[in-house]
């Protein structure tokens, strides 16, 4: 187990030991016997359902209010800024509500990044992703059930590559956007931050929600902003049009690559996990 010694303090030096939490086992059979495990899966399902329901409704509402053929105008609706707030705000709310139950992932890319960093087991990661995708499908299904007259007419909230952009550009936008999100998740939930900056109150869901908000502002014109494979998959399943399916791979490959890069950067560059492991190995060899 790695140990850091933090040195600092105004007017002198004070040492504070910090121990990294142990990595999650690859396969943890014991967690399958615990109700808390299944409660966490249910929490991920419901959170993703609510996330898609609110955000897709917001997107469809905006498009209907700006549809000139239906009496709308360019200044109607919440605009791109409002859509970005809907996505970021819902992530803030839902992470706040579910963080103590499931960790508040609500996103297969986040789950994948945390799995690579050994924060969750393989079984938990897989079942989280399944729950998130099913929740997204049900959330979009509810929107279509309540807004059947508008759902297909205004695109069903499905992610598609915008005209004028290459697939490479769309993929890069998804990689970078997901990197920003997952990097923020790692930083906001880092237990070392709590040990080092215990005097600074940090509400982890807030920077995570803001990261989602900022990424949406930047990438809505390019891909409609995926950065969440469950969000893209659920909308594509219910909308079920060729364009959404043709571009679907971008919203899986991009976020997973971005999450992997963020996990590597945080764990091996910022936290220097490889250097710590090598140092521990050398210390034990010299004993």
Image (tube, grey):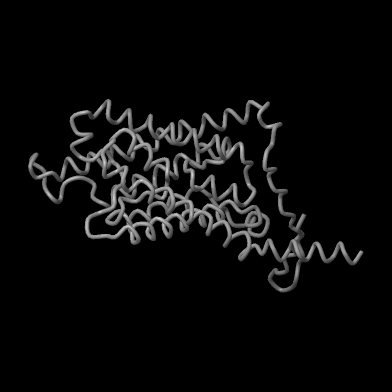
- Picture layout, residue 105 above or below residue 150: below
Image quadrant containing the N terminus: bottom right
Picture residue at 68% right of the left edge, 61% below the top: 273
Q: Position of residue 209 (x, y in %)?
A: 44, 49
Side (left or right) of 185 relative to 153: right
Q: Is residue 150 above or below residue 198?
A: above
| Point 71% across, 49% down: residue | 21
| Quarter residue 39 falls in | top right
- Looking at the image, residue 71 sits to the left or right of residue 12; the answer is left
Residue 118, position as x, y percentages in the image: 64, 49
Which residue is nearer to you in this view: 20 or 267?
A: 267
Q: How many marks overall?
A: 0
The residue that appears at 72% across and 48% down in the rendered structure is: 22
**For the point 20% across and 43% down, which residue is it?**
63
Picture quarter with the C terminus: bottom right
As rendered, which of 63 and 94 lies closer to the eye? 63
Q: Nearer the viewer, residue 283 or 92?
A: 283
- Where is 191 relative to 60, above or below? below
- The percent position of residue 117, horizontal first and vertical second, equals 62, 52
């Amino acid at each position: 187990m790695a140990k850091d010694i933090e040195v600092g303090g105004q007017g002198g030096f004070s040492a504070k030991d910090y121990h990294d939490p142990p990595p999650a086992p690859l396969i943890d059979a014991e967690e399958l016997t615990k109700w808390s495990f299944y409660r966490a899966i249910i929490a991920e399902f419901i959170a993703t359902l609510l996330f898609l329901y609110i955000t897709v409704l917001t997107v469809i509402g905006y498009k209907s209010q700006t549809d000139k053929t239906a009496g709308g105008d360019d200044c109607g609706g919440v605009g791109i800024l409002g859509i970005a707030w809907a996505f970021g705000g819902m992530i803030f709310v839902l992470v706040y509500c579910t963080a103590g139950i499931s960790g508040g992932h609500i996103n297969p890319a986040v789950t994948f990044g945390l799995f690579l960093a050994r924060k969750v087991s393989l079984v938990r990661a897989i079942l989280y992703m399944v729950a998130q995708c099913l929740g997204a499908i049900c959330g979009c299904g509810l929107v279509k059930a309540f807004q059947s007259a508008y759902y297909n007419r205004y695109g069903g909230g499905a992610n598609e590559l915008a005209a004028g952009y290459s697939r490479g550009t769309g993929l890069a936008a998804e990689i970078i956007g997901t990197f920003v999100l997952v990097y923020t998740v790692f930083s906001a939930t880092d237990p070392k931050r709590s040990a080092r900056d215990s005097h600074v109150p940090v509400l982890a869901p807030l920077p995570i929600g803001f990261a989602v908000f900022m990424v949406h502002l930047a990438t809505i014109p390019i891909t409609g902003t995926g950065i969440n494979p469950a969000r893209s998959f659920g909308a594509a399943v219910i909308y079920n049009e060729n364009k959404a399916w043709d571009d679907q791979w971008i919203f899986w490959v991009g976020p997973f690559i971005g999450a992997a890069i963020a996990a590597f950067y945080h764990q091996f560059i910022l936290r220097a996990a490889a250097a710590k492991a090598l140092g521990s190995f050398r210390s034990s060899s010299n004993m």
